[in-house]
Image: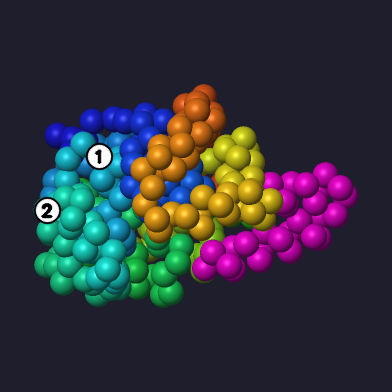
Amino acid sequence: MRTALPRSRGDIFRRMLQHPRYLFRPWIPIVKAMEGEVFTRQRLIPPVLDVACGDGIFAWATYRGPLDVGVDLDPVGLAEAKRLGAYRFLTVADARAMPFRSGSFRSVTSVCAVEHMDGLPDVLRELSRVLAPGGSLFLTVPSDQFGDLLLASRIWRALGCPDRAAAYGARKNARSQHVNILSAEAWRQVLKAESLEVVETAYLLSRGVMAVWGLFTSSPFKLAFLPFRLVRERDWPWMQRLLRRLLLSTVAPLLDRAKGTDSTTGGYLFLAAEKGSP
């Protein structure tokens, strides 16, 4: 049984741009569209728990129906998730201490969140606890290649400055509050320690997508984009239509043509793990 029918990367990107919060921050939908496509291809058996679900825009844009349960520390974000109808039940909770009985869920997802959480063993232990034996865990996290694949890092290396490239990547990880940056093998080991056996790994965000994302997060682009940001509070429909048309005509085709997953290279990493029987 599936909780969602597949959407393409372009479809997810287009849907996310329907929400004003991300229309004016288009670098976020670029990443989320790539993550969303891989999640729609998973067999999510209910009940499904989404950990650190935030404002629910990702689930709303990615799935064709609500997931069962979403948890997050931010009540403001959960209010928006409720308004969107992205989940059947929502509650404020810390990923390290969730208010659910052991084995409550057959599927647990977490999209680009675990990398920000202190106390990684405690987080993974709790994810394993609420997952039923035989259930599946699906995660996306920045990969250990994230810093190296950033556009500025690649430019510094091309100029023969590998130390500057490494320093830029480290600063970007720090600014993004990435406290858990592990290799695929390291993730396999820390998950195994909590009775979670990795059954699939795939790299997302190819070099090309990382280049586009790097351009959109660069200072020159943000400066050129500033007029749109300055007037976003005016809620001008014509301005939103113009911006949406520009983004859909330029970025969406690139995403649809980009390589979806790779076995060795990518700025993000997808992990699927199964919980063993006791």
Decide: few, some or many residues near mark 1? Use Cα within 10 Å; few <14, some 14-19, many ≥20.
many
Separation (CA) of disc 1 from disc 2: 13 Å
Magenta highlight on residue 166: yes
Q: Position of residue 232 (x, y in %)?
A: 43, 54
Q: Position of residue 177 (x, y in %)?
A: 52, 68
Q: Earlier in the sequence, mark 1 or mark 2?
A: 1
Decide: few, some or many residues near mark 2? Use Cα within 10 Å; few <14, some 14-19, many ≥20.
few
Hey, which residue is sitting farthest right in the picture?
A: 160
Instruction: Identify residue for label 1.
Output: 63
In the rendered view, would you say 54 is above or below 61?
Answer: below
Q: Give the quarter of the image for residue 130.
A: bottom left
The magenta segment: 151-177
Residue 274 visible somewhere in the drawing: no
Q: Give the quarter of the image for residue 161.
A: bottom right
Which residue is pictured at 80% across the width and 60% down the height? Answer: 164
Choose between 4 and 78: the one closer to the eye. Answer: 78
Relative to 216, 203 lies left or right: left
Kind of residue at badge 1: Tyr
* Label placed on residue 170: none
Q: Position of residue 10 (x, y in %)?
A: 41, 30
Q: Secondary structure at mark 1?
A: loop
Magenta highlight on residue 120: no
Q: Secondary structure at mark 2?
A: strand
* Label placed on residue 88: 2
Kind of residue at badge 2: Arg
Which residue is pictured at 25% across the width and 70% down the height? Answer: 75
Relative to 212, 64 lies left or right: left
* Quadrant the C terminus occupies: bottom left
Magenta segment's dominant SS is helix
Residue 155 visible somewhere in the drawing: yes
